[in-house]
Image: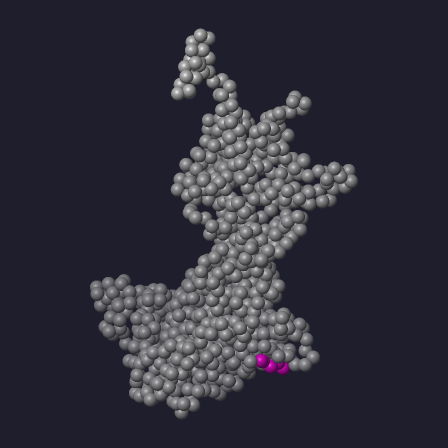
Amino acid sequence: MKKLVIGILAHVDAGKTTLSESMLYLSGKIGKLGRVDNKDAFLDNYELEKARGITIFSKQAILDIGETQITLLDTPGHVDFSAEMERTLQVLDYAVLVISGADGVQGHTKTLWRLLNMYRIPVFLFINKMDQNGTDKNKLMKEMKQLDDGCVEFGGVKTDSFYEQLAMCEEDMLEAFLETGHIEASQIKKAVRERRVFPCFFGSALKLEGVEQLLEGIGEYAMLPSYPKEFGGRIFKITRDEQGNRLTHLKLTGGILRVKDALKGGSWEEKVNQIRIYSGQKYETVNELEAGAVCAVTGLTLSRAGEGLGTEEASYAPVLEPVLSYQIILPEGCDPREMLPKLRQIEEEEPELHIVWEEQLQEIQAQIMGEVQIEILSSLIRNRFGIQVAFGDGRIVYKETIKDTVEGVGHFEPLRHYAEVHLLLEPGEPGSGVQFGINCSEDILGKSWQRLVLTHLEEKEHKGVLTGSAITDMKITLVSGRAHNKHTEGGDFREATYRAVRQGLKEAEAVLLEPYYAFQLEVPEKMVGRAMTDIEKMCGTSEIAQTNAGMVLLTGSAPVITMRNYQKEVAAYTQGLGRLFCSLKGYEPCHNGKEVMEHIGYDSERDLENPTGSVFCAHGAGFLVDWKEVKSYMHVEGFLQKKKELPEETAGNQAGYTEKEWISLEEIDRIINNTAYANQGKKTVWKKHRTAHESYYKTSGYSEAGYDNGQKETKEEYLLVDGYNIIFAWPELSDLAEDNMDGARMKLMDTLSNYQGIRKCQIIAVFDAYRVQGHLEEVIDYHNIHMVYTKEAQTADQYIEKFAHDNKKKYNITVATSDGLQQVIIRGAGSSLLSARELKAEIETATERMRQEYEESQDKKRNYLIDTLPAEVKQQMEDLIRKEDKK
């Protein structure tokens, strides 16, 4: 049988559950029409639902329309349970949006409409309670048009007017109508599926009016989806049955699911023990299920709502989220640490509860949508665990974001550990949440390390630095980093990643956010002034939306904290005539941020679980660096420090080009001695006392080159120059590179060529070309030196390291670089070392010495004309000069 999943959504008290009962009754699924007020509705079977007359948990029922099996999902309408409704949206094929004819389109109705649009769900509308006095179909239809111009009344006779309205919704239907005066059902069906047309049906669910037309409309205009053969599923809910069995509710979006199949989530793999098809409280078990069906399975203990299975990706986090935080007060003698795991069970079923353990306060907190949810949570805890809890006063859940773009740097380098992470933090659109991305070359940081950083970004809720509230509305992008071949472990990147986020937040201009309500306030005309004054005092904004029959409708927004409990005040000053409808609008800058920060008293510098500084290593030991100073110690060049985009072959190879990243020879000696020889025995005691300078380094100066008086075998000398590193370290070349990289490169080559004429050693200048696709290693003779362009996927660092390692016994090798990590590697490999600054000084010294020697030699060789004259003539000349001097 063909399958279709349809959800019923509505503002509270619009008659949604009553419509569900009517649909089940007319389809023959139930023999008696239940009622919410009689507490015998087929789908409202939880005691608190019966007591309060509202739907709290989404329910499932099965009914047949012709040859199509409909899985009907009844969702909560109360705003406190919006997250439960939103999770259900992610598995729907179509939705039925119920609107009360007596109330019209409310604030929460518009919220639901935005969510349906976001999830791209086709919608049928049922305008209910049309039997009540004062309902006006034409007025209501105008309100539907405000939601979308594609709202068209169905259910009546298909007149020319009906087809004209459809023709205005889509070009193909317009062409068909103009040609034939008629529009085919297949075209209408396609337009409904593409959300161009939204069929509207009017009636009374309680009196079974218009419900049959709705069912017929769904049967005629709903398009059955097609599913792939590959297995896929989406988990939307976790519950427990009366026996305590954990149930994972999912929709099968591809392939076939069988009992004992192994399902795999993000970090788990478990077998399905049972497949249940629920309808109300009852269920039937099946051995296998085809795509399109909704079921509950047992056997999964680690599954989570929102996870994707097989080909299905994880769902979006709910847009509607808790805005209030309450302390859970446990009875005397109840250990909070024992209670916490039990509450985590309920959090699995209701993720929006967001159970939090506050270590500093030693208390459990629950973030919830509203006070009705407190009653539900209290009832769940009492019924399941036999513990009566109370709740403290509600506190607003604040959030934080940033105004400007910054680069956060985190470094973690205690002895024998190493990781550095650079993150770009950018402000996001309001309501966008926190998004993560990668914009980092794999030549800078390997793919596996990049994935690890992304995992660490996503694995926790990052705290802001103003109040310790969660961050939101920003994008965090990995732009650079560094690992060590030997010393980096996975935990190092976790530390560096967390610290990078916090360092960036400290550096940015942080903004405190608070939740805002969007409201509709209906009051008598004479009360408008009072209402608008109240809203202004609440730091909100309002405007008159419409006036009708002595009543005025105000719309606007205001902070949740100022508008809480305002409903009671409205009822009081309007003598019960006023009505207030609120829905969560989102987070906006806090109206009294300074006051809130002083009240919370959060100190980001003392939050030991979320450090803002970094750990660096010196003298063989780690030391802490304050967040303000981290960028003075970092090993990789800052992403935002680049003044201009570099040529493609140089991009990504800028790490370590700044003066502040040079490491002194003494520091390198200490690093090598504290690591390489720390565990050597007595047989190598000479190595402990012999410095790296004594072991490896011989000055590459002009005055000492090649002079050994024949007492030992001399090796040919090689000078390897990290080309781009030197260019960006020498100010005159760096400035030139901004405008002309080729010019800077050639100027360096000319300088090295002149130096080679003085030094008489082999000079190899190495330049990166690893980002040039398909590039092979290229060696070019430039006058008397060699210029190397590396092959694809090989950096200059890698080429130099390999050359030094392969030829260290054959040649005396000196490497010119200011890359701090590279310096340690080169010295450890036994090669000599020159920093960029030392190379520049060496070249200048050698050039000056050569100039002086040349001038001295020229003076010795100089011939004067007077020396070539005969002695008599020479004497005459001298006498003449003396006479002239006397005058």
Quadrant of residue 7 within the rendered picture: bottom left
Residue 35 place in picture, x, y as percent:
46, 85
- The residue lying furthest to the bottom in this view is 575
Q: Residue at x 61, y 35 (%)?
A: 832
Q: Residue at x 51, y 85 (%)?
A: 52
Residue 418 place in picture, x, y as percent:
61, 50
Q: Is residue 485 left or right of residue 54?
A: right
Q: Is residue 538 visible?
A: yes
Q: Is residue 425 above or below residue 392?
A: above
Q: Looking at the rendering, in which quadrant would you find the N terminus? A: bottom left
Residue 620 place in picture, x, y as percent:
67, 48
Residue 373 place in picture, x, y as percent:
53, 79
Q: What span is colored magenta in the figure?
A: 387-392
Q: Looking at the rendering, in which quadrant would you find the C terminus? A: top left
- The residue lying furthest to the front in this view is 887
Q: Is residue 286 above or below residue 101?
A: above
Q: Nearer the viewer, residue 225 or 769?
A: 769
| Residue 110 sits inside the magenta stretch | no
